[in-house]
Image (cartoon, rainbow, N blue to C red):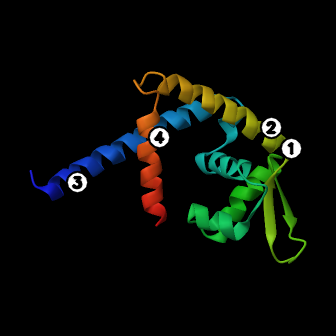
């Protein structure tokens, strides 16, 4: 097997593994009756906003690689469910800022704790409790940022 063929095989395995991990993640997310009404994009948006105070519509469109109209639809659904709120920037009224509402923040914090417990259970089955996996994933993330 040539080096190029080996790289392709590793890439295929990586793709399959990541899809499998996403499936595990989504099954975990979908267990709660509260999340039953969310699609993957809505849930991911709550995760992103949970890690920040707020984000602009432009930032969110960029993260999702989605046109502003698509982002507006996702935000509209979450505003209607009272998980997200919008406001205009004090500095520039043309800029719309999106943030979690109190209900959205509570959901995020609850789900974050559930996720941590789930990952602890999964990683506890590894000999090093996931240290090497985290190191490898951080290296991949750093390569992709460059």
Q: Secondary structure at mark 3?
A: helix
Q: Residue sitting at 76 percent across and 50 percent down?
A: 78
Q: Residues within 10 Å of mark 4 (few under 14, many from 20)?
A: few
User: Could you tell which of marks 4 and 1 lies nearer the N-terminus?
Assistant: 1
Q: Which residue is mark 2?
A: 106
What whole-number distance in Å separates the C-alpha atoms at marks 3 and 2? 43 Å
Give the answer, above or below, for where 124 lies relative to 58: above
Task: List the residue tagged with mark 1.
Answer: 102
Disc 2 versus disc 4: distance between alpha carbons? 27 Å
- Residue with the mark numbered 3: 8
Residue at image point 44% right, 21% down: 125
Assess whether mark 4 and mark 3 are in contact (beta carbons under 8 angstroms): no
Q: Which marked residue is nearer to the observer: mark 3 or mark 4?
A: 4
Q: Callout 3: few (<14), some (14-19), or many (20+) C-alpha neighbours within 10 Å?
A: few
What label does residue 134 carry, if any? Answer: 4
Q: Residue placed farthest to the left in the image?
A: 1
Residue 30's spot in the image, x, y percent? 60, 33
Q: Measure the alpha-carbon separation of dots 1 and 3.
A: 46 Å
Q: Nearer the viewer, residue 16 or 127?
A: 127
Q: Which numbered dot is residue 72?
A: none
Task: Give whichever of discs 1 and 3 has the lower sequence position.
Answer: 3
Q: Are marks 1 and 2 in contact (CB under 8 Å)?
A: yes
The foreground one among 139 and 114 is: 139
Q: Is residue 30 visible?
A: no
Image position, residue 109 (x, y; %): 75, 37
Neighbor class of circle 2 (other Cα within 10 Å; few <14, some 14-19, many 20+) is some
Asked if marks 2 and 4 touch (Cβ < 8 Å), the reply is no
Earlier sequence position, callout 3 versus callout 4: 3
Q: Please say if the residues under marks 3 and 2 sit with CB atoms less than 8 Å apart.
A: no
Q: For the residue labelled by badge 1, is the local secondary structure a helix, a strand or a loop?
A: helix
Query: Decide: marks 4, 1 in contact (CB < 8 A)?
Result: no
């Amino acid at each position: 097997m040539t080096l190029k063929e080996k790289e392709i095989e590793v890439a295929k395995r990586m793709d399959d593994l990541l899809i499998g991990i996403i499936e595990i993640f989504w099954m975990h997310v979908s267990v709660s009756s509260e999340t039953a009404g969310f699609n993957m994009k809505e849930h991911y948006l709550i995760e992103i906003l949970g890690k920040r105070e707020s984000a602009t519509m432009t930032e969110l469109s960029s993260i999702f690689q989605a046109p502003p109209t698509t982002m507006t639809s996702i935000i509209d659904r979450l505003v209607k469910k009272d998980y997200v709120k919008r406001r205009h920037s004090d500095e520039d009224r043309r800029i719309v800022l999106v943030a979690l509402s109190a209900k959205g923040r509570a959901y995020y914090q609850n789900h974050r704790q559930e996720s941590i417990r789930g990952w602890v259970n999964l990683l506890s089955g590894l000999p090093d409790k996931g240290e090497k996996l985290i190191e490898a994933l951080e290296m991949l993330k750093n390569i992709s940022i460059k």
